[in-house]
Image: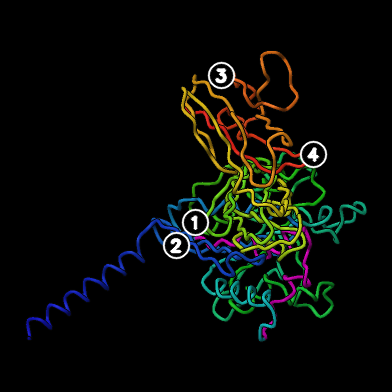
Amino acid sequence: MKKLIILYIFIIFIFINTINAESTKRPRKEHFVFFKNTQNELNVYKLYGRLDGNTVFILGGIQGDEPGGFYSADLYPNLVLEKGNLILIPRANFHSIITNDRGLNGDMNRKFKSGTPSDIEDEIVEIIKKYMAESDLFLNLHDGWGFYSDIWVGPGRNPKRFGQSIIADTDIYFNGKDTLKLEDMAKAVLLEVNKKISNPKHQMHFMNTKTFDEKSEYDEMKTSATYCALTNFGIPAYGIESSKNLNTLEEKIRYHNYAINEFLDYMGVEPEHPAIIYEPPTLSYITVLINNYKKIVVPNNDTLRILKGDSFKIIHIESNYERGLSCDVANWGTNQDLHKEIFLDGSSVATISKDNMIIGKISIVVNNFTSDLIAYVFETNGRKQVILDGQRFKIKRGEKFKILDILSQNETSKNITVNLKGYVPQNGSNKGEDRGYLIDTDKLYWKRYSLYGNGKVYPISVRNGKHVISKSYIEIID
């Protein structure tokens, strides 16, 4: 019995040490999701370097109409750190980002006073505070109007403008044990940042809002994230502002990254710096789950057809970006309907966005007939094969086939037309009726009609007059 107890203790010891080893593994990344699959989804990334060091917290998107900030922050989660740590929240206010609004429920950057949370945005603020407590430096990313200047130059460049500045609430702050020289740190960073900015009109400057002064013109800053980080947690805190008046989004992202990277260097956090490459977001397709069992792919600008009474879920968005994607089904749900089970009585449109930029739309048609009972009859090499609505007829490149007929419980064959997109009969007739022709897959070369533009998957559209009642696909296997 004594030996058995010793064995149990030994196993528990090994188990605890294994957990500790995993939690201290470096380098590593942790990803936490709050309010998942909602319009307020909050993604938090924690990056740990090979060597421990200071922790820098970067916050983007607290105001939804400032894309320079959240696009810039979004370049950092995939880094590997050599030294130090990063906490990243690229999109603090995703709901407002989706709608391109500063703040749908007021300015989230004015909600950092202590108090009991009264709504979901207050809950997000409390989560942000939790990560402030783990940090040695806090950076809040913004886009501001005009260009900051210590002196009046004009209406777009003066001491009241925020763009192209690094902002602090004071020049010096004593946190109870250390004196934080906020202005000195910011100017050291700016010295290096401005070496990289060739346009003198785009140079960045230090702005002191003097929030603690009784006569401060920026008393509202006492409810901001930077003031909270400075006074509640005793860490240096800055707003980094690119200008909303810059010509391109790429410029805004680049200037943010210049400032972020110099702050990281100042704090001894050594990353593999992200490439400042902005690629316009695009939508390839969405994946839809019908009645929780049938998956179909719907390309951008195509149509999803369902039966009245069917449920569907949009379970995947295929884009050239992974983060910041949302789907809004008109007249149903919220701004974020991804992964929701949806029932529609009538037709609608699904709008797909990357942050606040619309990248595609899917029409949704609700029919009253049973499209599952529509069957496509093919012939290849003397063999007949049948597929149903939404399925794919797979055939090897070089083989020939015929679309023999369409069988339907609700439609007669003579009332419908069957059109293979990308195919034109040899006789030059293109009336949209392609049944009965011997089709050579080597001659299906109209790639622009194919599903992904690569000449491999071509849609077959079945119409009754102007109405599409079913769609299936030819898939060519190389």
The mark that comes first in sequence, 2 or 1, is 2
Residue with the mark numbered 2:
53
Q: Nearer the viewer, mark 2 or mark 3?
A: 3
Kindly check if marks 2 and 3 are in contact, taking CB atoms under 8 A apart as contact.
no
- In this rendered view, identify the residue nearer to me: 374 or 290: 374
Kindly check if marks 1 and 3 are in contact, taking CB atoms under 8 A apart as contact.
no
Residue with the mark numbered 1:
269
- Which residue is at a point 58% across and 71% down the rendered structure image? 235
Give the image quarter of residue 449: top right
Going by the numbered disc 4, the residue's amino acid type is Lys
Spatial separation of the CA atoms under disc 2 and disc 1: 7 Å
Spatial separation of the CA atoms under disc 2 and disc 3: 64 Å
The mark found on residue 440 in the picture is 3
Kindly check if marks 2 and 1 are in contact, taking CB atoms under 8 A apart as contact.
yes
Q: Nearer the viewer, mark 1 or mark 3?
A: 3
Residue with the mark numbered 4:
466
Going by the numbered disc 1, the residue's amino acid type is Val
The answer to whether any part of residue 451 appears in the image is yes
Spatial separation of the CA atoms under disc 4 and disc 2: 66 Å
The mark that comes first in sequence, 4 or 2, is 2
- In this rendered view, identify the residue nearer to me: 154 or 307: 307
The mark that comes first in sequence, 4 or 1, is 1
Give the image quarter of residue 470: top right
Q: Is residue 108 magenta?
A: yes
The mark that comes first in sequence, 1 or 3, is 1
Going by the numbered disc 3, the residue's amino acid type is Asp
